[in-house]
Image: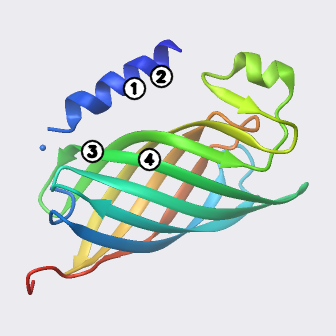
Amino acid sequence: MKLFLKGLFFLAVNVVIAQHEPGAWVIGGQVMSRVNKIEDIGGNFQVHYAPNCYSSYIMEVGLLNTKEGIVPELGISINSIMFNFQSWMITGGMGFIANSVDISKKEQDEAIFSFSNGSNSLGVLLKIRTLISLSKGWQMSADFNFKTVGGNFSTVNWGVIYEFPLKGY
């Protein structure tokens, strides 16, 4: 719980530095792999909304192919800029993740924040993301997603996102 509160404080402090143009809608796709089992791969589709140039809301829907079967996931998070360099930036954020993994009682007790009702789980998603500008509107994104659901379902993601042009840019 302490990590959750620290993360919330960190997010609130960082909401104040430009990811995307204010009011922009962004879509993208990524390939993902579990951190502890590189052979478990999948992909996700993302939709972002940037209410201002400092933060963005991200909704991602993904599928992860594991030995136990295909695991669908739904994640919702808010990201803010941590560092902004010339052509790339690092963002961080947090949100919620839901998937169809049954979490054991022991895993629930050891998790920072997670709930399970048998076949579905809800937990916290902490996201560190790097955005590298490729051309106008196109960016490469690489993410590390720490998830508190389903044992170690933390993933590394890599993909491309596109920001729809606003105001003729």
Residue 45, compared with residue 64, is above or below; it is below
Precedes in sequence: disc 3 or disc 1: 1
Q: Mark 4: which amino acid?
A: Ser
Q: How many marks?
A: 4
As rendered, which of 63 and 133 lies closer to the eye?
63
19 horizontally vs 64: left or right: left
Point out the frontmost of discs 4 and 1. Answer: 4
Tell me the residue that label 1 is attached to.
7
Rendered residue at 91%/54% (across/down): 68
Mark 1 is surrounded, within 10 Å at the Cα level, by few (under 14), some (14 to 19) or many (20 or more) other residues, namely some
Tell me the residue that label 3 is attached to.
80
Q: CA distance from mark 4 to mark 2?
A: 14 Å
Tell me the residue that label 4 is attached to.
77
Q: CA distance from mark 3 to mark 1?
A: 12 Å
Q: CA distance from mark 4 to mark 3?
A: 10 Å
Residue 135 at x, y percent in the picture: 22, 81
Q: CA distance from mark 3 to mark 2?
A: 16 Å
Rendered residue at 69%/43% (across/down): 153
Residue 116 at x, y percent in the picture: 78, 33
Residue 167, compared with residue 48, is above or below; it is below
Callout 1–callout 2 Cβ contact below 8 Å: yes
Callout 4–callout 3 Cβ contact below 8 Å: no
Q: Mark 3: which amino acid?
A: Ser
Numbered badge on residue 4: 2
Callout 3–callout 2 Cβ contact below 8 Å: no
Mark 2 secondary-structure assignment = helix
Rendered residue at 37%/26% (across/down): 8
Rendered residue at 16%/50% (across/down): 84
Precedes in sequence: disc 4 or disc 1: 1
Residue 96 at x, y percent in the picture: 54, 41
